[in-house]
Amino acid sequence: MTKTLQCISPIDGSVFAERPVLTPDEARAATARGKAAQAAWAARPLQERIDLVMAGVAAVGDMNDVIVPELAGMMGRPVRYGGEFGGFNERASYMAEIAERALADIEVGEDATFKRYIKRVPLGLVFVVAPWNYPYMTAINTVAPALIAGNTVMLKHATQTLVVGERMAKAFHSAGIPEDVFQNVFLDHDTTSVLISENAFDFVNFTGSVGGGQAMERAAAGTFTGVGLELGGKDPGYVMEDADLDAAVATLIDAAMFNSGQCCCGIERIYVHESLFDAFIEKAVAVVNGYKLGNPLDAETTIGPMANVRFATEVRAQIDEALAMGAKAHIDTFAEDDGAAYLTPQILTNVTHDMRVMRDESFGPVVGIMPVKDDEEAIALMNDSDFGLTASLWTSDLDRAERVGDRIETGTVFLNRADYLDPGLCWTGCKQTGRGGGLSVIGYHNLTRPKSYHLKKVTQ
């Protein structure tokens, strides 16, 4: 019997989409086609590859009216926010803009006797395993630069956003990118692990859970396949005594609650200077009490259901455990909270790092907030985490922010903003957040390998 993948809609628990998975032999054939197509794709002029990728991106944009409600149905993001095409296009456009200089030869030297340089050459077949929370933007982070650099790409999307890869493949193929150059596949975990262990790919990029990343590394063990990982996060915000309080509250609470808290770099814990703590809490509670929880297809809804009941169950468990240990909940249960996927956004105080809600990734609409007396205490608390993706600092003193930022164990330091991916900067993390880096010039370096040329000239 053929195994299938099912996307269960968080709106009402119905089956939104269902697709059969490839058998191991079918999957092997797909990877073989991708590898066979790579040399001809890489041989095309760089500008031609750029133009084809950007035409594919534009074709995705042409589908946006269909994509936005489709995303609401699959993972619950309210239609009022308009989908992901803005960020999708911004990231692809930036990587297209810098491609020529990012992939340019590194000139080492040339004289009458020798010419020496380093080329950036594509790795081959790149396997992208994309998550459901921002399914288009996270996928394009790797898909666009991988294709532009001359790699072929195989995309496996999360079951929760099952049709996203189909949309991208349809768009890219309609723009003229050959079907074997960019493939969307449906795979189960076992077949995925088998392919990686058989060295079917030349690079694997995975965005997901720590456990998923560990499974990828185990599968790749001994193959020498490069693996790029963006895993968990527990991103902190730190509000210093000279911060713009209203801006800090608005930005940090939005960063904690937007997309029902299901953001890779969402804020999950906040440390506020004790002089601002009470005012921060009062303003934050007012913001959250203004949210409208409901069906994401309703234009009035500002916060939708979590993508899956099991995700909401974990967030409720963290909140309940914290309350049992003495935490204080500031938001009364919303009438629309159904005990399942529709979850009341919550602010907790009286929290400590003994509580899971301050240590484990929540990936939901809950944030713990603690007072701190100075930078030293805030730095110690921010670094008291197994994760390191981003940290958001709030102060009017740029030099102070840089000094504090230098001491935080994180991949990105934000000042007076949060929850944003700048494609000009490397998207990276440390500790259990993973390794590697996407976007920016470094993103191209991670999707290519250096090849050195040491050419001795024949002279008479």
Image: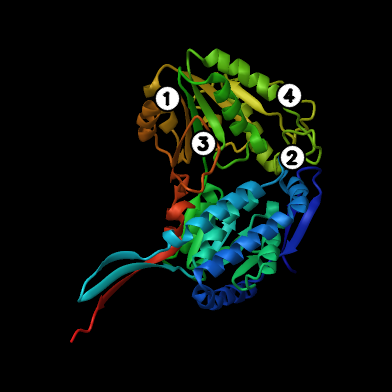
Where does the image place residue 257, in percent across and percent down from the top left?
Answer: 64, 32
Q: Is residue 329 visible?
A: no
Name the residue located 73 percent from the left edge and 37 percent from the top edge.
304
- Earlier-in-chain disc, 4 versus 1: 4
- Earlier-in-chain disc, 3 versus 2: 2
Location of mark 2 (residue): 78
Q: Secondary structure at mark 2?
A: loop
Q: Amino acid at mark 3?
A: Lys
Where does the image place residue 278, in percent across and percent down from the top left?
Answer: 56, 13
Q: Compared to 17, does 124 lie above or below? A: below
Residue 167 or 357: which is nearer the viewer?
167
Of labels 4 and 2, the one closer to you: 2
Where does the image place residue 194, in percent across and percent down from the top left?
Answer: 55, 67
Of labels 4 and 1, the one closer to you: 1
The reply to whether the C-beta atoms of the residues labelled 3 and 2 are less than 8 Å apart is no
Specify few, some or many for label 2: CA neighbours under 10 Å numbering under 14, 14-19, or 20 or more: many
The reply to whether the C-beta atoms of the residues labelled 1 and 3 are less than 8 Å apart is no
Q: Secondary structure at mark 3?
A: loop
Where is residue 174, by image quadrant?
bottom right
Quarter of the figure that contains the C terminus? bottom left
Cα–Cα gap, marks 4 and 1: 30 Å
Q: Is residue 436 left or right of residue 107?
A: right
Residue 152 is marked as none
Where does the image place residue 335, in percent across and percent down from the top left?
Answer: 79, 26
Name the residue located 62 percent from the left edge and 24 percent from the top edge.
347
Location of mark 3 (residue): 234
Location of mark 1 (residue): 378
Cα–Cα gap, marks 1 and 2: 34 Å
Of labels 3 and 2, the one closer to you: 2
Location of mark 4 (residue): 333
Q: Secondary structure at mark 1?
A: helix
Q: Amino acid at mark 1?
A: Ala
